[in-house]
Amino acid sequence: MIEENSQKDCDEYLAAVLELYLELPETPSRAGWHDRERVSELHRRRVPLTLVESAFLLGSLRRLGRPPESPRLSPIRSLAYFMPVVEELLANPFPDGYLEYLRYKIRKLGADQIKLPRTGTCSKKSGSS
């Protein structure tokens, strides 16, 4: 029973993280096996979903907030792009409420193609009906 719940938690975490990742600008339309491995690693390390979302948004904001005259960056090809930001936030966590600020900032920058969840990112579909 515990193993079954653990697998369900892992599947939900995987689905939630991949959904957040794929909704970002300049990311692929599908996740690869290496992206799934990274997410499994984050789950094994018990990295909170809110921290992962914060890292995704912060990494995207850093890209989107570059001066217009800067050379264009190539698209993000892997979730691995965000791993240094995850490590940065693990070492120096944001204060409470900062995730909402990041969501606000990315919307303000005009990243309307991002469909950010309003609340409860942990309640993503688990793949079972």
Image (cartoon, rainbow, N blue to C red):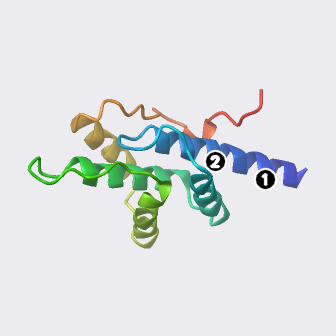
- Across and down, in percent, residue 12 comes to 67, 43
Circle on res. 50: none
Image location (x, y in percent) of residue 64: 24, 47
Note whether 61 is above or below 95 in the view shown: above
Which residue is labeled 1 in the image? 6
Q: Secondary structure at mark 2?
A: helix
The residue at which mark 2 appears reads as 14
**Residue at 77% across, 32% down:** 128
Q: Where 91 sits versus 43, above or below? A: below
Asked whether residue 97 appears in the rendered view, the answer is no
Viewer-closest of 82 and 45: 82
Please tell me how crowded label 2 is: few (under 14), some (14-19), or many (20+) other residues with Cα within 10 Å. many
Farthest-out residue, bottom: 91
Above or below for 128 versus 105:
above
Labels 2 and 1: the sequence-earlier one: 1
Residue type at numbered disc 2: Leu
Where residue 81 sits, quadrant-wise, is bottom left
